[in-house]
Amino acid sequence: MTKAFIPPAKPIIGDDERAAVDRVLRSGMIAQGPEVAAFESEFADVMVAGRSCVAVNSGTSGLHLGLLAAGVRQGDEVIVPSFTFAATANSVALAGATPVFADIEPDYFGLDPAAVEAAITPRTKAIMPVHLYGHPAMMRELAEIATRHGIALYEDAAQAHGAELGGRKVGTFGEFAMFSLYPTKNMTSGEGGMVSCATPEIVRNMKLLRNQGMEAQYKNEIVGFNARMTDIHAAIGRVQLTKVGAWTEQRRSNAAFLNANLTGVVIPPVAADAVHVYHQYTIRVREDRDRFVAALKEEYGVGSGVYYPVPNHRLDSLKHFAPGLDLPETEKAAAEVVSLPVHPSLSQDDLDRIVEAVNALAGAGA
Ligand SMILES: *Cc1c(COP(=O)(O)O)cnc(C)c1O
């Protein structure tokens, strides 16, 4: 292989981020402080139409604390997809509740409303869809089901910064919504999570839970964590927030090129009134996916990813929540998906090489 390897993801860290970190380090105040507060309000304005946001030290902490802040307790059930990163169900289990896995719809890889409705029991507290790969889940249908059954709706928006449905931003549908700021996500703070909150009560609970259960020093009201974001991380996030819009446009334009030029594979459908932010550009390869992935890398130097090869309900850590469960669309997706590079650092040469590789391998029946 003479050509340079095209990585499946590439965090972009520039001089502005380095200068911001340096500024905080020189200030001598590096734990949670003014940078975090500024990041929260700027993120709220850019991403979730001004809804109050609370920053934490990871996306997983954001889900965990969000569930607790919204009142999820032991004995409750929360309906989640199995076709997602394990953090979705892990956070439900860590909150002491039971993750109930429902199947996905085949187009956008999100929770299937009919499957969700069938999974509702008297113990169901909430539905927590994932906007997988950056495409919104079917929020209108899920919200209607939640309202009709008197249960809550939350959002795992870890992969969907800036995505929209019907002109409405993801992260504004649920009682709370979590955005991850891990380096491979559409924007990063190093590690971190941001939680968008629908009510002042959830905001207050989040702030208590992230800081030992106290608002005023040594007046602890509840038992809480240390899940605070540092000002160092917030300073990185603030810079990235000014750039993520342009990066998303580049992702969308890269995806449009792939859509127009790939043949022989199933390209990712987009709902008519959705804005897809292409955290991943995920195709389905119907035959011999693993050989396809290996050949992409070895013959063409094209990196790719399989997210996720093992559904959560079959992981050793989570399978006791789902004995005997069969989720056919989840299994099918887990066997077929391949995510191609779509990140904003791709050159036109890179995109051409990705198209050449996929079309040659798909045409060869790989
Ligand atoms: C990344 C991710 C998380 C967890 O976020 P971290 O910041 O890595 O803790 C949760 N859910 C989904 C769908 C993710 O992709």
Image: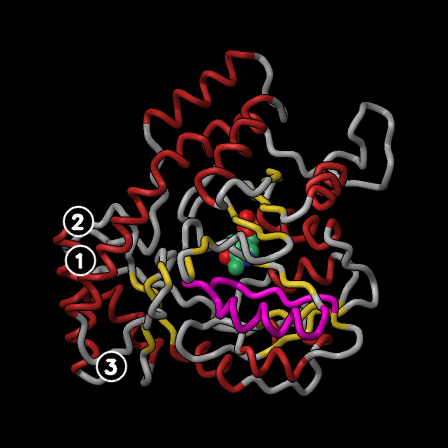
Within the magenta stretch, is there residue 128?
A: yes
Residue 94 visible in the current orientation: yes
Q: Nearer the viewer, residue 140 or 365?
A: 140
Q: Nearer the viewer, residue 233 or 168?
A: 168
Q: Quadrant of residue 101?
A: bottom right
Q: Residue at x 57, y 83 (%)?
A: 114
Residue bearing the label numbered 2: 347
Which amino acid is tagged 2? Ser
Task: Please give left or right for residue 258 compared with residue 102 in the image.
Answer: left
Closer to the chain start, of discs 1 and 3, is 1
Q: Work out whether 150 lies above or below 50.
A: below
Query: What secondary structure is marked by label 3?
Result: loop
Which amino acid is tagged 3? Ala
Residue 129 position, x and y percent, is 56, 66
- Find the residue positioned furthest to the top: 27
Residue 235 position, x and y percent, is 48, 27
Which amino acid is tagged 1? Leu
User: Is the shortest distance between ligand 1 and the CB of mark 2 under 8 Å?
Assistant: no
Q: Residue at x 38, y 79 (%)?
A: 336
Report how far apart the C-alphas of labels 1 and 3 lie in the structure.
20 Å
Residue bearing the label numbered 1: 351
Residue 134 visible in the current orientation: no
Tell me the mark number nearer the camera, choosing from 1 and 3: 1
Residue bearing the label numbered 3: 366
Closer to the chain start, of discs 2 and 3, is 2
Query: What secondary structure is marked by label 2?
Result: loop
Query: What secondary structure is marked by label 1?
Result: helix
